[in-house]
Amino acid sequence: MLKIAMAQMEVVPGHPDVNTATILRFIEEARAKGADVVIFPEMAVPGYFLGDTWEQSAFLRDCESYGRDIIAASKDITVMFGNVAIDWQKKNNDGRVRKYNAFFIARDGELVQPDNMPYPYTIKTLMPNYREFDDTRHFFSLQKLARELGTTPSKLLSPVTLKIRGQRYRAGCLLCEDGWSDDYEFAPFELLEKEHLDFYVNISASPYTLGKNDKRNRVFGRQAREAGVPLFYVNCVGLQNNGKTVYTFDGSSTAYNEKGDVVRTLPEYEEALTVLPLAEMKDMAAEPESEEKDIAHIYRALHYGIRRFLENIHMKKIIIGISGGIDSAVAAALYAKVVGPENLLLVNMPSVFNSATTKGLSQELANNLGCQYMIIPIQESVDHTIKQLEETPMVNLGTGSETHLKVSSFVAENIQARDRSARVLAGAAAAFGGGFTCNANKAETTVGYSTLYGDQSGFLAALADLWKYQVYALAHYMNDVVYGREVVPQGIIDIVPSAELSSAQNVDEGKGDPIKYPYHDYLFRSFVERWQKATPEDVLEWYKAGTVEKNLGCEEGLVKKYFPTAADFISDLERWWNLFTGMAIAKRIQAPPILAVSRRAYGFDHREAQNGAYYTRRYRELKAELLAK
């Protein structure tokens, strides 16, 4: 009876030595458990998100060398693993050496060649070139190879025949995107389906995004059911990034039987190995579908991502500026769970505009967490800065004339934000021996509702892929489930969101941010996360049809509540669109790395150019029509 092991390993990007040691350890564990086959993830040797490290020939040679170590370790066991494959005699379209994203199979110290492949490995067919993926920049696809050889992918894509203990098994080998073929010109799975296979293997390096696992179970379960054979999906765990955006890899490796049922799922964010007897899978009971709420998955992604990010940069202590607001409170509760309250310093930095209410809530939060706490008033420093700017003469060296700067109330707000971050938090971080956080949420990040070199500063923006409503949901989840007690004070959850930078934002009078989160969260989301992104033209079409809330997914009646007239609605729309496509882009470019949980995170996922706001001809027609009524 064939026994197949799924090895869910942590892949450390750019460190083939570390990854190979992990693979060799898992091979021994699989062998000890009587497995005939052990499966590892896509790009298990080098990692996946490496930037232009792929252009280093020395690194490529190292990956080949470690690949040979894995092949040599395959005595009496079949080892399936992902690695970069190099044809040193050929070139990619960019003139650099030819590289393939490859699926290797080794047995008894030798590679097992797919039936029709020109190389002793399977080459990835479908190259994702959207969101954070950039495969075509580095790798040559099976489609390109087929054209080069004057044939078709269907002629090259072929099963691998395995000879194990006197039996022959035919395996269909796929690499990640090859199983997600809905929008491609052909489907590798369907091409292999004609080959009378015994099972499929999909090795993946698939980053976590909210809802992806449910969709994958639907897609891969259907594939297994229609083919009538089991399918093994093996994903990695770990943390990888492409500079501006940080991605968690959750694992969640899954075995589907021939009925399409999920019969084994490995845990999120943990290394694990499981062995399944192939012949018994059809009789295994289907695992119950998870009833966990989305926010539970988001919390685990954030906790794991923060922990691994800190480990990667060797940071053990965290400083957070807390205001008595929800974002900094949630950040504090998150980081306290990761580094421990003894390694967390919360700093409250009140000005004359901060109320006794929010100062008290900050103290209550710190007490609940039992962490380090400081109160550093900033008003004296802010006043000093303003005085210096206004009283220091500004000399025109060409004419010799003198003038003085005038600090407006708006500039004074920015001075407060910068004083808190650039002076107090940066200094405290250096003295405490840690780093300070950026606590921005996704709504603020979308329209640049933050101050450059102020509250947008920090080493990581852990909440910047969460909309405000998700931040509130996370506060409730941590109170109810993670801590099992009220850590984030109910007063912080209840108070109106406010930057408290002026008297116009007095929380005790119910005055807060200009962003109406119950509506704007969803409007901004339509700009970013819809696959066919919304523009002001789309939003005005919906307004004209009376379907804004339906299309955005927000609560009914909010448009009428917030915008009594078409002019009010249009003014608001243009205000935020101008910021989203204007100054906010410059701010996002300078923002800290963002920890991704959605399918369109800012950074490398959502690529943008600084072109300024644009309104289509149809938008201008709609605007004129609505304002004329």
Image (cartoon, rainbow, N blue to C red):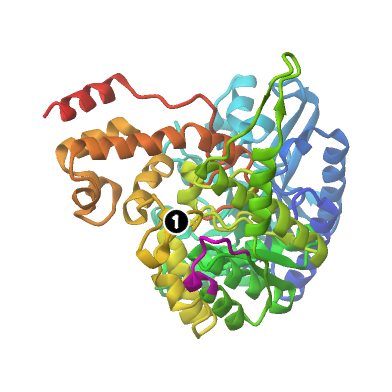
Camera-side residue: 343 or 526? 343
Q: Is residue 276 visible?
A: no
* Coordinates of residue 509 in the picture (x, y in percent): 36, 64
Q: Report whether 615 appears left or right of 358.
A: left
Q: Is residue 125 above or below residue 611?
A: below
Camera-side residue: 135 or 192? 135
Per the picture, the main secondary structure of the magenta-coloured stretch is loop
Q: Quadrant of the C terminus?
A: top left
Q: Is residue 564 above or below residue 8?
A: above
| Residue 440 location, quadrant | bottom right
Camera-side residue: 162 or 41? 41
Camera-side residue: 446 or 77? 446
* Coordinates of residue 208 in the picture (x, y in percent): 55, 56
Residue 358 sits inside the magenta stretch? yes
Callout 1 secondary element: helix
* Coordinates of residue 492 in the picture (x, y in percent): 46, 71
Label 1: few (<14), some or many (≥20) within 10 Å? few
Residue 604 sits inside the magenta stretch? no
Badge 1 is on which residue?
Answer: 503
**Which residue corresponds to the image point at 57% horizontal and 63% vertical from the top-left?**
301
Farthest left residue in view: 629
* Coordinates of residue 190 in the picture (x, y in percent): 45, 42
The residues colored magenta run: 349-359
Q: Amino acid at mark 1?
A: Ser
